[in-house]
Amino acid sequence: MRRRTLAASLGTAALAAAAVPTAVQAKASGRCEDVYTWRNAIVNGGGWVPGIVFNETEADLIYARTDIGGLYRWQEPTQTWKPLLDWIGWDHWGWTGVVSVATDPVEPGRVYAAVGTYTNDWDPTSGAVLYSDDYGETWGAAELPFKQGGNMPGRGMGERLAVDPHDNAVVYLGAPNGNGLWRSHDHGRSWAEVTDFPNPGNFVVTPGDPYSGDNQGVIWVEFADDGRILVGVADPADPLYVSADRGRTWQPVPGAAEALGTADGNRTIPKQAAIDHENGHLFIVTSWNPGPYNGPPATGRGGSIQRLALATGEWTDITPAYDPLGTIPGFGGITVDRQRPGTLMAATENHWYPDEILFRSTDSGATWQTSWDYAWDANWSWPPERTDRFTLDPTGNEWLTFGKVDDGPAYAIKHGWMIDALSIDPHDSDRIMWIGGTVWGTEQLTAWDAQGPLVGWDDAAGHQVPLPVEPFEVGIRVQGIEETAVQDIAALGGTLVSAMGDLGGFVQTDLDQPGAMIRRPNWTSGRSLDFAGLNPDVVVGTGDVEGEVDGHVGVSLDRGATWLTTKRLDGVAGGGNAGTVAVSADGAVIVWSPGDGTTTPVCSTDLGQTWTPVEGLRLAHQAGGAFPVPDQRQEKRHDRISSCDAPSACAVGRRRRIAR
């Protein structure tokens, strides 16, 4: 029996590990059955949260949508998130990708989720809108005649779902790929296309590409106090529409193309919007790319922030004039403070190095402050001194360093990247949450406004100096969200080793704690694991690696506490090609089948420092499960054995059957 209990996971949730017997019930036949309680092995996040949505009526009612891991509701007493879509089964696995969420401002118990993971053929099922009347405790589903992309480009835009606060039976949905604007008149039970809506969008990142070839479509819906409905569309030439008659007719908003459709000559689309109802302003952030992986365009700025006066139709470009890193690459999230009219925040997407910028304005965008800044010496020497408005406390998620240390202005733990989710609590100006490698949050946000500027000028020294500020604290707000893409696990008895997409892998001795991240080899994604059945201290794994130093295969001799990298195999490129690995029962022989599909499987008897081709074994043979185990406590195998010429014999085989 293979000791790996999960391989090639779909990646929709953290591994459900540590099945704990809670009772053993004897039957009349004398046979006993174990009753198990299943729970998550804690990682705390691990995936991406494209949207965080607060209910505008009920305090502490917050939803977080994930791209592959379902929908969550905040639990204020425990400061944790509760999963709401764990009931979704294999037949509809794509519904764990949540492209949008809407919480009803009139009847807060009602919540809606637009679901579907991929719009291409990776996901075999059509999308749906899930609806609940009890805060997500139970759900109904209205299936749609098109797919939705919770894990596709542009998934951080929106929100595409919106409840009409003037008639909460009406819910709108913006759709991708030419499917237009949709509407429900019965609290999401049934849907129909708004056929009079004139523009389904046309913005495509890479035409013809199976992943980035989507028409981004209809992006978001907002409601003005006077009943007007505003809809953002992925069309630089015609990006904003309005209806003044409850959605019966639609007109382009004058001046929208000039304001929203270009930035320094780069075509842009309206990614997100937020309304300041008190001041009558619609704020919109734009970007040259729907995200979330983009950097800056080749030239010029990649986006802008625009303000529309709803009473007069006047457009004002309020893009921050200053960014510590120079040209703005584009924008991710935008949010307004409903307790403090005129206060709004926005995030860049993506600078990547050394960090993203959060902008904050308290005067409707007339002036801005940044979340951090540089102070340069008289010679403009590198690196400059970096000064920050807040500190990040990663307690509980120390793995967020990804094995790095502070390096000048590049901190090991960043403010974030791909910051599309950025939300100020409408009931509490001090609370904000945003995505940035994890869900960050604070309840001290307004301390920012008392800090003043971060950098000043020293006349005597003739250079910039950081000004004294009292930083406030930002901490982890991700507990309860588990959405890692688990590729393989090895359960050693008291130790769980996992290989994970995007995160490399983890070693856990306490399943209530995230444990240690495997960082050498520097796997971008872990792919395969095995351990020696008679010597479980020996663990081997494979992963996709960057650079030319680390090998794809890693070896641990102490149950995953420390790892050794192996020699890079000539001709097998990094960035992928991890393949599958196995180790003999005594830990003496490692067999690795690289994942490039052209390299003959290899074996090693010196912990991967040298590799020898396995003669007679076909290409891309999956090495996993290859070794007979000479121990009566494990299943016996009848295998067909192949040999390789190595300093000591190593053998692999194809399991034909198992006999007990």
Image: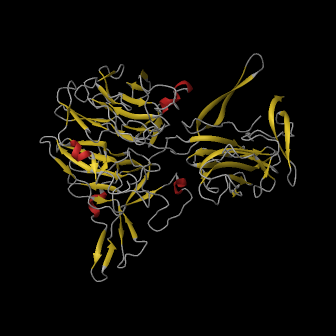
Position in image of residue 442 (x %, y %): 38, 51
Q: Quadrant of residue 520?
A: bottom right
- Rendering colour mode: secondary structure
Q: Compared with residue 516, is residue 208 higher up or lower down, i.e. above or below?
A: above
In front of the other: 162 or 297: 297
Q: Quadrant of residue 462?
A: bottom left
Which residue does the image show at 44% across and 24% down from the upper left? 138
User: In front: 293, or 299?
Assistant: 299
Would residue 604 be visible to someone looking at this image? yes
- Quadrant (top left, top right, bottom left, bottom right) of the N terminus: top right
Point out residue 340 in the picture as x, y percentages from the top left corner.
22, 48
Residue 78 shows in this picture? no
> Which residue, as the protein is rendered here, is positioned at the far top?
28
Q: Is residue 522 left or right of residue 247?
A: right
Q: Vertically, is 126 above or below 487?
A: above
The tally of labels here is 0
Q: Position of residue 217 (x, y in %)?
A: 35, 34
Where does residue 329 sit, x and y in percent of width and height? 36, 54
Residue 136 appears in which quarter of the rendering? top left
Image side of residue 406 versus residue 169, left or right: right
Q: Quadrant of the C terminus?
A: top right
Q: Left of 6 or right of it: where is 159?
A: left
Extreme left residue here? Answer: 312
